[in-house]
Amino acid sequence: MGRGVHPVAALVLACTTTFALFSGLLLRATIHPPLFTPRSAAKASGHGSHARGEPPIRGVNLGGWLVLEPWITPSLFYQFLDDDPPAIDEQSLCAMLGPAESRSQLRAFRDVWVTEDTIATLRRIGINTVRVPYGYWVFGDQPSFCPGVSSIEYVDRAVGWAEEYGLRVVLDLHGVPGSQNGFDNSGEAHRPPFGVRFDAHAWLSDANVNVTLGVLRRVAARYANSSAVVQMGLVNEPNGFIFPAACSANCPVDQARLLAYYERAWDAIRSVNSRVAPVLDASFRDGAWARLHTPSWRNARAVLDAHRYHAWLPGGSEVPQLVHLRRAGCDARRELATMAAEALPTVVGEWSLAVTDCMTFLNGVGAGSATTSPAACGRVRCPETFGKLPRYVGSGGPLPRGARGGPDAAGMCPVGPHSAPRGPLEYDAFYRLLVAYAVSSFEVSAGWIFWNFKAEVADPRWSLLAVHERGWLPRTLDGWSPPAPDCGETVAGMPVAWLGVGACASLVGLIVALAVAATVADDRQQCAAHIAERDAGGAFVKLWTVNQAEDRQSS
C-alpha cells in the first residue's frame, strides 16, 4: 500500500485524472497520451546507443525460410494432412517427399519467400539487422536430414543483399543433431500428438557436438571476410524448462553443460573468423547467467539473446491490456537492464505482438491453441500460396488427426482474436502502444529482432511488414524514439498510471467508487497472477501441460 496515501483518495485521484486523459486519447486516437509519457521519449526509450556505444539493433528474423516451421508456411504442409502421421517438420517433410521432390519443392519456395526486394523494403523502413536462422543440414550433406537438399546458397544470397543494402546479419544456428529443444524450429518436432519424446541432452553427446562444431566452423569460415555478418548465434532456444509433453529426460538442459558447449562453439568459430561476435541464447533462464560476466566473453563482444513472447501467457485472451503493457513497458526493461549489468548486453532476438497462441499450427501440426479457447480465436481464409487446401476440406467426412489447429472443414484457419484484449484501447491503438513500449524497453540494452518478417496466414501480430503496413510502427524507424511508461511511483503496490489504466480508462465515465475499486481489484488480481508467470519457462510449462492433456482426450 502506498506510503502516506489513503487508497480511496488515490483511486479517486487516479480515476479522475485518467478519465480526463483517456477521453482525449480516445477522441484523438493517438498512442502518445500524457498518461503514458511522463518522461521525454528520447530519455525513456534509451534509443541512440547501448552499453558498448553502438546503435541498438533494430532487426527482423527471416524465419521459416531455411528452417521450415509449419505455422509460418502451412500450405507447404497441406499435402500431408490427410496422412497419418502427417509431416510435422522439415525433417519429416523431406523424408516423405524424398530427395528429388524435396529439392524441387523447397527450391521453388525459397526462391520467392525471401527476395532482394524483401531486403530492400526492410532497409527502407529502417531495419538495420536481419537474423537468418539455418540448420546443421544447411550444406545438404547430412545423411539423416534432407540429404542432397542444400540451402547454403540462400544464405549466400541473404549476405550478399545485406552487404549491398547496408544491413547487418546475424547467422543463427536454429537446429542441431538430436534437437536442442524438441520444437519444429529445430528441424525435428518432438511434441504430441505425433512427435516422439526426446532426451534434452542428446544434442550434447560428443558425436552430435562434433557435427555441430564442424558446421559452425564451415559457416564462419565461409563468411570470414563479409562486412555484413557481424554475429553468429551458437544455438537457438536450448531447452531451459521442464517440458514433460515432449521431453523424456534431462529437462531443463544442465546449465554447466550448456556453458561448456558455448565455449567450444565459440572456439570453433573464432578459429576461422576474427570478425564476428557470439550470441548466447539465455534458454528462457534470464536470471542465471552471472557466470558469463567475464573479461573473455566481454572481450569477445558477446551478447545474450532473451526471447520475449506474450502469446503463451497463462490466461490467453483473458489477459487484460494492463498486463501486456506493463510486461512490455516495465518488466522487460527491468529484466534486460539486470541481465546487462549482471551478465552481458542482451538482445531480444525474438518477440512478436501476438497476445494469444491462436495461430495456425503455432503449437505444432495437430495441436490447437492451449492458453486460449479455440472459440475465442479469430478465423481467416487459409492461404494456398505453396499448396492447395487438404482433401478433407469440404468433403463432409471426419477430420484427420493432423487437422487440429489447422484448416477446418470450411477452409478457415485460426488466428488471433480480431480485437484488442480487454481494456480501454481499441485494436490499432493498443498494438501501436504495445510495440512502442516493447521497443523502448528492449533498447535499454542491445536492441531487438522481431519474429517474423512475414507469415503466410494473415495475422499482422507475427509479421513486421504487416505491422508497418497497419501503421503500428512509424513510416521509418530511423530517428524514432518511442514513448515509455513511468514505472515508478506506486499506490497499493502498482504505479498510479497503471491503476488508472486498469481501473478507470475502460469506463464510459466515473460511475461509482465501488465499481472503480472492483475493477482495480480485478485487474490487480489478474496482473499479479500473470506477472508471476512472466518468466517464459512457466508459460511454456503450462502450455505444453495443457496441450498434452488435450491431445490425450482427442486421440
Image (cartoon, rainbow, N blue to C red):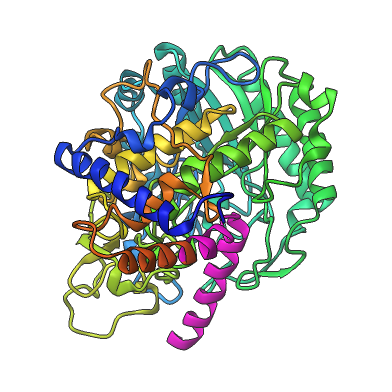
Is residue 522 toward the left or the right of residue 423 in the image? right
Q: Nearest the camera: 456 or 512?
A: 512
Question: What x and y, as percent, mark residue 439?
Answer: 45, 33
**Most common SS among magenta residues:** helix
**Most foreground residue, 167 or 195:** 167
Q: Position of residue 381 (x, y in %)?
A: 18, 60
Q: Is residue 192 above or below residue 307?
A: below
Relative to 65, is 334 on the left or the right? right
Q: Is residue 302 above or below residue 20?
A: above
Residue 407 is covered by the magenta coloring: no
Residue 23 placed where, x, y %? 20, 44
Q: Quadrant of residue 446?
A: top right
Q: Residue at horizontal 34%, vertical 69%?
A: 514
- Left or right for 146, reference 198: left
Q: Is residue 531 magenta?
A: yes
Between 389 and 300, which is closer to the camera in this rendering? Answer: 300
| Count of numbered badges drawn on the protein | 0
Q: Nearer the viewer, residue 361 or 466?
A: 466
The residue sitting at 50% across, 16% down in the picture is 48
Q: Residue at x 22, y 38 (%)?
A: 470
Task: Locate the N terminus and report the quarter of the image it occupies.
Answer: bottom right
Where residue 170 sits: x, y (%)?
56, 28
Q: Is residue 76 visible?
A: yes
**From which residue to which does the magenta span run?**
526-555
Q: Is 311 displayed left or right of 3 in the figure?
A: left
Residue 354 visible somewhere in the drawing: no
